[in-house]
Image (spheres, grey):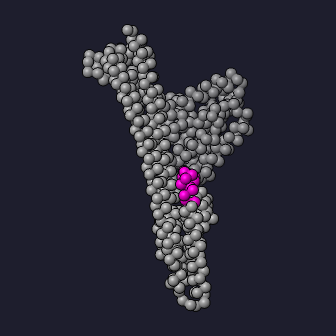
Amino acid sequence: MQIRSKLALHLATLLALVSLLVVALYTLVQACQLREQRQMEGLRLHTLAAELPFTADALGRMARLYVYSGDVRYLRYYEELLDILEGRRERPAGYGPGYWNLREAGAPVATPVVGEAHSLLARLRAAGASEQELAEYEALLRRLMGLVGMERQAMNLAGEAWTAGLGRRPAVFGEAYLRERAALVAPLQRLQQQLQERLVHAQRESHLQVRRSAWVAGVVALLLVLHALWATWRFDSSVRRPLVVLRQWGAAVRAGRLDSRTRLDSADEFGELSAVIDEMTASVERSLAELREEVQRRKRAEEAVQHLANHDALTGLPSLRLLHDRLDRALARAERQQEQLALIFIDLNGFKPVNDRYGHEAGDVVLKVVAQRLAGALRDSDTVGRVGGDEFVAVLVDVAGREAAELVRAKLEALVAQPVYLPGAQLAVQVSAAMGLALYPETARDAAGLLRQADLEMYARKAQYKRANGEPLGREPGPPAAP
């Protein structure tokens, strides 16, 4: 028989067994639910059936206590008992034997009500009592009401005696009352015995039904397990599964998923082959991971070197080399697009005193802050770079003219002149800047000319600042050399 045919037969048998198991389990669940329901109904009916005897005893006890003590709370308890029995008052939580003993002793009892107010007879009907049982309970309730009439008469006489100050009346309950109470006991016991026998019989039947359903479900489950074991031995012990796994692994490797594994847990030749294949694949995957990591490391290193070659290490601004390259590109574009270009040469005033007084770390802080302010004030298309110790150059592309460039220079001067906070010294220092401006094509038409003209104007403004502050003039003017 072909493997496909065997598999189809196996699946058909499996589906049939599973269907039978589902039906058996459903029957078992239904039987368990029915048994639980009958147990709950029996418990509820038994509890309600016991309520009549303890209610009769509690009524008689409250009547006698009131007659012999004259305490009106026993009269109130008596009325509450009757109201609960006849459905005029909700039954308290935990209502049952012992409840009124706790009330008499003044102990705390549960006060929340449970459900709506119903008479004892209505509750018995709702709990599943038969019509014969209900008729017998109704007869017992009528006899109990006769006792209630005697007790009320006795309590009324005792109440009149207590009101008149005659003291208690021990002879209120006579022989007729005692005979009537005794006549109530035997029917109650017989009725409770009948109810108990009926409940036991119903529980026995439900238990037998559960056992039958469990046996059926167990037999079907055993058949299903045996069939599954046979099918597993018949198919999984063959070479079909190892070949399928190896074929899938080969397809995954050809697709580039080198993390694929065969993971054949058999102890035969296929298992050994699987272990060798998985080890080889893991080795190749580790080698490729190491190679990718090395490539990424080299790429990051090259990027870092390239960045350091074109940017200032302290401020992160373009270095002199990158600045000259961008200036040449900006000039080429300005010539091609017939645009104007501005170059601002920036030299800080008062930077050396800060460096000398507070140290090089403070000077580095000032340079970083100034660089951030200059870069933040310009457009993304503009460029600002550091070309010396405290010298910067800004290249402004596509400017509207000298007035626009002057406005930018004034803005940069104002930003540089703002105080700089030194965390180490915990104070703020202030520097300023001498800025020389050169325009293309108005001032010069090449990079060297723009740098020279901007440097000359910067030097003139620097000299003016130093003469105003009585400082020596310093270096001679001259633009930074190209790298």
| Residue 15 seen from this side | yes
Counting every numbered tag in the picture gives 0
Q: Is residue 221 magenta?
A: no
Q: Is residue 440 left or right of residue 302?
A: right
Residue shown at the point (49%, 74%) measured from the top left: 178
In percent of width and height, residue 423 lies at 49, 54
Residue 169, given in percent of the width and then of the height, sits at 53, 85
Give residue 210's position: percent from left, percent from top: 42, 39
Farthest residue, direction bottom: 165
Q: Main secondary structure of the magenta part?
A: helix
Front-lying residue, 251 or 142: 142
Q: Nearer the viewer, residue 68 or 423?
A: 68
Identify which residue, 357 or 183, lies in the foreground: 183
Q: Nearer the viewer, residue 303 or 49?
A: 49
- What segment carries the magenta color? 124-138
Q: Is residue 282 above or below residue 61?
A: above
- Residue 219, quarter of picture: top left
Q: Residue at x 55, y 40 (%)?
A: 391
Question: Considering the image in quadrants, where does the N terminus appear?
Answer: top left
Vertical comparison of 329 with 470: above or below:
above
